Image: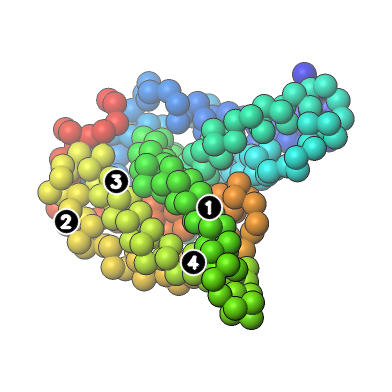
Amino acid sequence: SGKYVHGGRIESHGCHISAESGKYISLMWQALLLPCAHPEPTSSQPGGGKHCVTATVRLTPARIYAGTAIAVAAASAAVIPAGPTARQQSPGAVRAALRALRLDNDMAALLAHGALADAAADVLAQAVAVDSARGRTATADLDWRRVRRSTLAALVSDDIPFLLWARLLHEASHRYVLAARRVLSPPLARALTHPASLAATKALLSQIVYESATAVAYLGLQAYMRGGGAAEAWAEVRAKFWRVWVDGLAFFSATYLVVFALPHYSMQVVVDNIASLVFNMYLSHVSHRKRGPPVPHSNSFCPR
């Protein structure tokens, strides 16, 4: 497999991952993918009820920060798009096979990267709350059902739609450039098809159209999956949408200029996933902030 243990560290192809961080990463995915075996009562979760606590590793905010950073960095390095000759240039049969697998499954790789970033965002949001209240060395009993809810809400409201949205803008911009160069004077065509002009136009459209839709979807899905039903989801959107949209405008105005200035479609998605990790920490905090009476837990999305 190319891996060996040395001095309590797992080493693989020049990448060094501490055993402790590796256990955290494994724990995070296990908790996300498997049902909760030992739910415990909590009063912090909106709607009351129970949440999943996994005690395989004693998690603290400091360990969560380190493990999450390693997981996201490794995943980002794995999905960064390669050049067209990457198959021939990759040394070693194993690395060449892995690179070919990545190139043949572009959409799946980008979605997996987005899902990891979504999960990391909620994990970090919970860790920051513990850090702020009790310090970096305090035990953080993560609510894994909340992590699953947030991951699914972000996938449905943002990751999958952004793959389609970015592809649409990418292809439309190529057609626009060709048409502009045919019908406009050369100086005007150069100005309107300059990469900076195209990036600014895409950023503006994304903020007005895309971010409005994704904010509504995320807030509504979070409330609905907590068991509130359609009425509670709509009330959540009405109460929190404007603040989320304004904060998103401040965050994504510059971010989208960077994202859409990148020439490679896959790279745009990777960078957006990383930026969305930061913003989704904020979204997770806002969506789990109590707005009014507790939501009944009997209709919760999460399995008991």
Tag 4 near tag 1, CB within 8 Å: no
Q: Position of residue 67 (x, y in %)?
A: 62, 41
Label 2, on which residue? 235
Q: Residues within 10 Å of mark 1 (few under 14, many from 20)?
A: few
Q: In front here: 98 or 118? A: 98
Tell me how far mark 2 sits from mark 4, CA to CA: 29 Å
209, above or below 300, in the image: below
Q: Tell me the element at label 3.
A: helix
Q: Residues within 10 Å of mark 2 (few under 14, many from 20)?
A: some
Q: Give the residue furthest to the front.
A: 183
Label 3 vs label 1, nearer the camera: 1
Q: Is residue 115 visible?
A: yes
Tell me how far mark 4 sits from mark 3, CA to CA: 26 Å
Label 3, on which residue? 222
Label 1, on which residue? 171
Q: Is residue 138 visible?
A: no
Tell me how far mark 2 sits from mark 1, CA to CA: 37 Å
